[in-house]
Amino acid sequence: MTSDKLNTSTYPLFIVISGPSGVGKDATLDSMKKAGFPFCYVLTATTRPKRQGEKDGVAYRFLSEDKFRQLIEANQFLEWAKVYGNYYGVPKQEVKEALKQGLDTIVKVDIQGATTIKKILPDAVLIFLMPPSIDELVNRLKQRYGLSSDELDLRLSKAQEEIESLLIFDYVVINHTDDLSLTVNQINTIVAAEKCRLKPRVVKL
Protein backbone atom coordinates (compact mmCIF):
# COMPACT_ATOMS: atom_id res chain seq x y z
CA MET A 1 0.00 0.00 0.00
CA THR A 2 1.41 3.38 -1.00
CA SER A 3 1.32 6.33 1.35
CA ASP A 4 -1.11 8.26 -0.83
CA LYS A 5 -3.76 5.65 -0.05
CA LEU A 6 -3.43 5.95 3.69
CA ASN A 7 -5.97 7.94 5.67
CA THR A 8 -3.91 11.05 6.22
CA SER A 9 -6.89 13.27 5.43
CA THR A 10 -8.79 15.53 7.76
CA TYR A 11 -12.29 14.80 6.51
CA PRO A 12 -14.75 16.03 9.14
CA LEU A 13 -17.06 13.54 10.80
CA PHE A 14 -20.82 13.97 10.94
CA ILE A 15 -21.92 12.36 14.21
CA VAL A 16 -25.53 11.55 15.01
CA ILE A 17 -26.51 11.01 18.65
CA SER A 18 -29.82 9.21 19.06
CA GLY A 19 -31.77 7.02 21.44
CA PRO A 20 -35.20 6.69 23.06
CA SER A 21 -36.94 9.54 24.82
CA GLY A 22 -35.53 10.03 28.31
CA VAL A 23 -32.23 8.26 27.69
CA GLY A 24 -30.22 11.42 28.39
CA LYS A 25 -29.23 12.80 24.98
CA ASP A 26 -29.34 16.44 26.11
CA ALA A 27 -27.42 15.72 29.31
CA THR A 28 -24.76 13.86 27.34
CA LEU A 29 -24.27 16.73 24.89
CA ASP A 30 -24.14 19.23 27.75
CA SER A 31 -21.38 17.18 29.36
CA MET A 32 -19.47 17.01 26.07
CA LYS A 33 -19.64 20.79 25.72
CA LYS A 34 -18.47 21.32 29.31
CA ALA A 35 -15.59 18.91 28.72
CA GLY A 36 -14.45 21.16 25.89
CA PHE A 37 -14.46 18.65 23.05
CA PRO A 38 -13.93 20.60 19.80
CA PHE A 39 -17.11 19.73 17.96
CA CYS A 40 -19.66 21.88 16.18
CA TYR A 41 -22.99 21.24 17.90
CA VAL A 42 -25.86 21.94 15.50
CA LEU A 43 -29.04 22.62 17.45
CA THR A 44 -32.29 20.94 16.56
CA ALA A 45 -35.20 23.26 15.80
CA THR A 46 -38.51 22.42 17.47
CA THR A 47 -42.03 23.70 17.93
CA ARG A 48 -42.45 22.16 21.38
CA PRO A 49 -42.91 24.57 24.31
CA LYS A 50 -39.87 25.44 26.40
CA ARG A 51 -39.55 23.51 29.63
CA GLN A 52 -38.70 25.24 32.87
CA GLY A 53 -35.18 26.64 32.75
CA GLU A 54 -34.71 26.16 29.00
CA LYS A 55 -33.40 29.00 26.85
CA ASP A 56 -33.65 29.44 23.13
CA GLY A 57 -30.37 28.63 21.36
CA VAL A 58 -28.96 26.47 24.16
CA ALA A 59 -30.45 22.97 23.80
CA TYR A 60 -32.90 23.78 21.00
CA ARG A 61 -33.97 26.53 18.64
CA PHE A 62 -37.61 27.13 19.51
CA LEU A 63 -39.81 28.08 16.56
CA SER A 64 -43.48 28.72 15.98
CA GLU A 65 -45.30 26.09 13.96
CA ASP A 66 -45.84 28.60 11.14
CA LYS A 67 -42.12 29.37 10.97
CA PHE A 68 -41.24 25.69 11.04
CA ARG A 69 -43.63 24.95 8.18
CA GLN A 70 -42.08 27.79 6.16
CA LEU A 71 -38.65 26.23 6.60
CA ILE A 72 -40.03 22.84 5.51
CA GLU A 73 -41.44 24.42 2.37
CA ALA A 74 -38.08 26.08 1.70
CA ASN A 75 -36.27 22.71 2.11
CA GLN A 76 -34.17 24.10 4.95
CA PHE A 77 -34.03 20.92 7.03
CA LEU A 78 -31.67 18.01 6.59
CA GLU A 79 -34.41 15.92 8.19
CA TRP A 80 -37.58 16.72 10.10
CA ALA A 81 -40.37 14.81 11.79
CA LYS A 82 -43.40 15.26 14.01
CA VAL A 83 -42.85 13.49 17.34
CA TYR A 84 -45.40 13.38 20.18
CA GLY A 85 -47.31 16.25 18.54
CA ASN A 86 -44.34 18.58 18.01
CA TYR A 87 -42.06 19.22 15.04
CA TYR A 88 -38.30 18.65 15.21
CA GLY A 89 -35.76 19.32 12.48
CA VAL A 90 -32.01 19.61 11.81
CA PRO A 91 -31.06 22.85 9.98
CA LYS A 92 -29.38 21.82 6.74
CA GLN A 93 -27.33 24.98 6.11
CA GLU A 94 -25.68 24.92 9.53
CA VAL A 95 -24.54 21.35 9.01
CA LYS A 96 -23.30 22.15 5.51
CA GLU A 97 -21.30 25.17 6.68
CA ALA A 98 -19.72 23.31 9.58
CA LEU A 99 -18.59 20.42 7.38
CA LYS A 100 -17.31 22.87 4.76
CA GLN A 101 -15.13 24.43 7.46
CA GLY A 102 -13.74 20.98 8.29
CA LEU A 103 -15.42 20.78 11.70
CA ASP A 104 -16.50 17.49 13.24
CA THR A 105 -20.22 18.06 13.61
CA ILE A 106 -22.75 16.58 16.03
CA VAL A 107 -26.52 16.54 15.88
CA LYS A 108 -29.11 15.01 18.19
CA VAL A 109 -32.17 13.36 16.65
CA ASP A 110 -34.73 10.68 17.37
CA ILE A 111 -34.56 7.23 15.77
CA GLN A 112 -36.74 8.27 12.84
CA GLY A 113 -34.39 11.18 12.16
CA ALA A 114 -31.32 8.96 12.42
CA THR A 115 -32.84 6.56 9.90
CA THR A 116 -33.48 9.43 7.47
CA ILE A 117 -29.97 10.83 7.87
CA LYS A 118 -28.44 7.39 7.27
CA LYS A 119 -30.24 7.24 3.91
CA ILE A 120 -29.17 10.76 2.92
CA LEU A 121 -25.63 10.62 4.34
CA PRO A 122 -24.52 6.97 4.57
CA ASP A 123 -21.08 7.98 5.88
CA ALA A 124 -22.54 9.66 8.97
CA VAL A 125 -21.49 8.07 12.27
CA LEU A 126 -24.61 6.92 14.12
CA ILE A 127 -24.35 6.41 17.89
CA PHE A 128 -27.26 4.93 19.84
CA LEU A 129 -27.54 5.84 23.53
CA MET A 130 -29.01 2.89 25.42
CA PRO A 131 -30.51 3.07 28.92
CA PRO A 132 -28.96 0.64 31.44
CA SER A 133 -32.39 -1.00 31.80
CA ILE A 134 -36.05 -0.42 31.03
CA ASP A 135 -36.68 0.20 34.75
CA GLU A 136 -34.08 2.97 34.69
CA LEU A 137 -35.74 4.49 31.63
CA VAL A 138 -39.13 4.40 33.36
CA ASN A 139 -37.67 6.28 36.34
CA ARG A 140 -36.10 8.91 34.06
CA LEU A 141 -39.35 9.46 32.17
CA LYS A 142 -41.37 9.81 35.38
CA GLN A 143 -38.92 12.30 36.88
CA ARG A 144 -38.53 14.32 33.73
CA TYR A 145 -42.00 14.64 32.27
CA GLY A 146 -44.54 13.84 34.96
CA LEU A 147 -46.37 11.68 32.44
CA SER A 148 -49.75 10.10 32.89
CA SER A 149 -49.91 6.31 32.93
CA ASP A 150 -51.11 6.22 29.30
CA GLU A 151 -48.41 8.66 28.14
CA LEU A 152 -45.76 6.66 29.95
CA ASP A 153 -46.96 3.43 28.36
CA LEU A 154 -46.85 5.08 24.92
CA ARG A 155 -43.25 6.27 25.36
CA LEU A 156 -42.10 2.92 26.71
CA SER A 157 -43.73 1.09 23.82
CA LYS A 158 -42.04 3.49 21.42
CA ALA A 159 -38.69 3.05 23.20
CA GLN A 160 -38.86 -0.73 22.84
CA GLU A 161 -39.58 -0.33 19.12
CA GLU A 162 -36.64 2.06 18.79
CA ILE A 163 -34.25 -0.30 20.55
CA GLU A 164 -35.14 -2.86 17.89
CA SER A 165 -33.71 -0.42 15.31
CA LEU A 166 -30.16 -0.86 16.60
CA LEU A 167 -28.91 -2.47 13.41
CA ILE A 168 -28.97 0.82 11.50
CA PHE A 169 -26.46 2.27 13.98
CA ASP A 170 -22.68 2.03 13.98
CA TYR A 171 -22.17 2.08 17.75
CA VAL A 172 -24.14 1.65 20.95
CA VAL A 173 -23.21 3.32 24.25
CA ILE A 174 -24.87 2.49 27.58
CA ASN A 175 -25.71 5.84 29.12
CA HIS A 176 -25.48 5.89 32.92
CA THR A 177 -26.76 9.36 33.79
CA ASP A 178 -25.05 9.16 37.19
CA ASP A 179 -21.71 8.82 35.37
CA LEU A 180 -21.96 10.91 32.21
CA SER A 181 -18.17 11.20 32.04
CA LEU A 182 -18.06 7.52 31.08
CA THR A 183 -20.55 8.10 28.25
CA VAL A 184 -18.63 11.15 27.03
CA ASN A 185 -15.33 9.27 27.09
CA GLN A 186 -16.82 6.40 25.11
CA ILE A 187 -18.11 8.78 22.45
CA ASN A 188 -14.72 10.47 22.30
CA THR A 189 -13.09 7.04 21.90
CA ILE A 190 -15.44 6.30 19.00
CA VAL A 191 -14.45 9.57 17.33
CA ALA A 192 -10.76 8.78 17.84
CA ALA A 193 -11.24 5.33 16.29
CA GLU A 194 -13.06 6.83 13.30
CA LYS A 195 -10.13 9.19 12.76
CA CYS A 196 -7.86 6.15 12.46
CA ARG A 197 -9.80 4.50 9.64
CA LEU A 198 -7.71 3.64 6.58
CA LYS A 199 -10.72 4.47 4.41
CA PRO A 200 -12.19 7.67 5.87
CA ARG A 201 -15.86 8.49 5.91
CA VAL A 202 -16.50 11.31 3.44
CA VAL A 203 -19.76 13.17 4.09
CA LYS A 204 -20.97 15.18 1.12
CA LEU A 205 -23.88 17.52 1.59
Image (cartoon, rainbow, N blue to C red):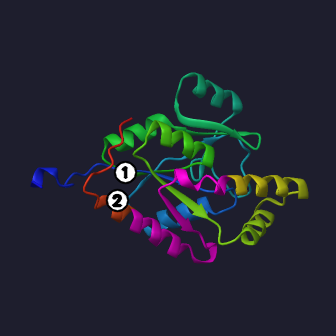
Query: Is residue 38 found left or right of 80 in the rendered image?
Result: left
| Mark 1 nearby-residue class (10 Å; few <14, some 14–19, many ≥20) | many
Name the kind of residue labelled 2 in the image: Glu
The image shows a total of numbered marks equal to 2
Q: Tell me where residue 92 appears, x and y as whole percent.
A: 48, 35
The answer to whether one can see residue 37 in this image is no
On screen, 38 above or below 103? below
On screen, 119 above or below 17? above
Q: Is residue 133 magenta?
A: no
Q: Quadrant of residue 3?
A: bottom left
Q: Secondary structure at mark 1?
A: loop
Front position in the image: 37 or 52: 37
Q: Tell me where residue 141 appears, x and y as whole percent.
A: 76, 63
- Residue occupied by mark 1: 13
On screen, 181 above or below 83? below
Q: Residue furthest right?
A: 149
| Mark 2 nearby-residue class (10 Å; few <14, some 14–19, many ≥20) | some
Q: Secondary structure at mark 2?
A: helix
Q: Tell me where residue 89 appears, x and y as whole percent.
A: 59, 39
Query: Is residue 92 found left or right of 1 in the rendered image?
Result: right
Q: Tell me where residue 113 appears, x and y as whole percent.
A: 58, 43
The residue at 63%/77% (across/down) is: 178
- Magenta range is 162-190
Instruction: Please identify, in this view, whether the residue under mark 1 or under mark 2 is nearer the observer.
Output: 2
| Quadrant location of the C terminus in the rendered image | top left
On screen, 67 above or below 193? above
The residue at 61%/73% (across/down) is: 176
- Residue occupied by mark 2: 194
Query: Please, what is the dominant secondary structure of the magenta stretch?
Result: helix
Name the kind of residue labelled 1 in the image: Leu
- Mark 1 and mark 2 in contact? Answer it, CB < 8 Å: yes
The residue at 61%/52% (across/down) is: 165
